[in-house]
Amino acid sequence: MSRLVVISNRVAVPKADASGNQGGLAVALLSALREHGGIWFGWSGETTEQFTGEIHRTEGNGVTTATIDLEEQDLDEYYNGYANRTLWPLFHYRIDLTEFERDFAGGYSRVNKRFADTVMPLIDHDDLVWVHDYHLIPLGRELRDRGLKNRLGFFLHTPWPPARLLTSLPSHRKLVESLFAYDVVGFHTEDWLDSFRRYVVDILEGTIDEDGCAVVGDRRVHAIVAPIGIDTAEFEAAARSKEARFARDRMHMSSTGRSLIVGVDRLDYSKGLRERLLGYERFLANNPDRRALVYLLQIAPPSRATVDTYQEIRSDLDALSGRINGEYADIDWVPIRYVNQGYPRQELAGIYRAARIALVTPLRDGMNLVAKEYVAAQDPDDPGVLILSTFAGAAAQMKEAVLVNPYSAEDMADAIVKALEMPLAERKRRWESMIDGLRREDVFWWCRLFLDALEGKHAHEHA
Ligand code: ADQ
């Protein structure tokens, strides 16, 4: 079996108990690394005055990690710049928030070269190399330029934007062409894959062959759909744990018979938090008799706090939740509990299980794992209802959720009423159908699907 080299912006450090507090992606990649042997390479999260390329290695639990420090300027231009102020908003259809700075593009290219220079000597000739996410799109090209001949794959965790949107990026053509250095490129949904193919046909004047490969001139890339899953079995077990029961009891005790509606998201404009609060406010306004029977717990730990737009969304939500609470709260009830901290996974599973409804309403999301975690955490005898945005990648797989348009406050308010009134038999039927899918297509299935394609028959040689 070939060794695996995983490359991503950040690296998850393996812990003795892999089922502990790690996200599903980390668990899957660590288990694939254990199975294949190999290395996980990325940025250490630390900065250094002058880039040296020195590699920090850790070995443990069958996995080697290798990380490098970056300069402060790299952080500004590559991570906070091109990755999070240019590509992230653009890939989430927010051209209004997209910043086009030449320095950002320069930093992005520089850091991708730095990654290539430092990881190259760590790669053996028959290793499989798997690059992750929008931070590192050009890395494959850089590695090929340095003579890498290995099987090389790329997975995008965000949406792929429509061609008309992507062409607003000054160097769009170079960016997309660099994807042709990979053997396999993976997306979460058919929608994102279709947008990629349209770009290839309309802008690069390429074709899609009978194997689904995108072809431009003599270059070919196998573009596939591989929807990421969660570690479903682990999450189902987490929801039955002592910590989960404790969290659930805490929720029940503090709410005296009221139905809990939960939202859990990184504090990010793509997650549609503002629109969600407005939808909930509309529900409160439209349903005076139901008001005091529910409350919303919105958990939103801050992320990317050094980027201005993220500071703005934080103060915007502080103000909005304060306004709604000010308008509707009573002496013994507040409609919104708004919390800005993270929780251990078992506790989170208990909170999900206590919730009658989950509001997962991103304006755009590559997949959205919270939707899947919520379903996995439910009590099979009395499952809650998932209200899911049609614009989350997860909606393609979770058709039994109550699907909503997150831009419409009325739609969201109606969905909350529908979920509150939904009979047990219907809740069970919908839940059973979704949990079956989650068990079948979990994160290990996803990992295998991608790696099979990477090892598979669609091989083509790179000169
Ligand atoms: P994210 O944008 O980070 O991921 P998501 O898929 O929802 O979004 O994953 C978030 C993870 O963080 C979940 O596992 C969730 O449990 C956890 N989390 C969020 N808030 C938390 C809190 N307060 N406490 C503890 N844990 C919390 C990107 C893409 C997604 C894609 C994933 C995986 O944007 O579309 O689904 O990668 O590909």
Image: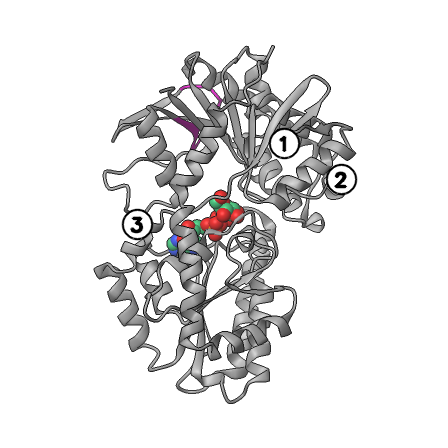
Kind of residue sitting beneath label 1: Gly
Residue 231: x and y, percent?
Answer: 36, 47
Q: How is the image coloured?
A: one colour
Q: Quadrant of the C terminus?
A: top right
Is residue 154 inside the magenta stretch?
no
Q: Nearer the viewer, residue 354 or 232?
A: 232
How far separated are the C-alphas under marks 1 and 3? Answer: 34 Å
Q: Is residue 157 above or below residue 107?
A: below
How far separated are the C-alphas under marks 2 and 1? Answer: 26 Å
| Residue 61 can be seen, yes or no | yes
Helix, strand or loop at mark 2:
loop
Which stretch is magenta? 40-54
Which residue position is annotated with label 3? Answer: 234
N-terminal-most mark, 1 or 3: 1
Kind of residue sitting beneath label 2: Ser
**The image quarter in which residue 76 lies:** top right
Q: Quadrant of the N terminus?
A: top left
Which residue position is annotated with label 2? Answer: 168
Residue drawn at x 56%, y 54% is 392
Kind of residue sitting beneath label 3: Glu
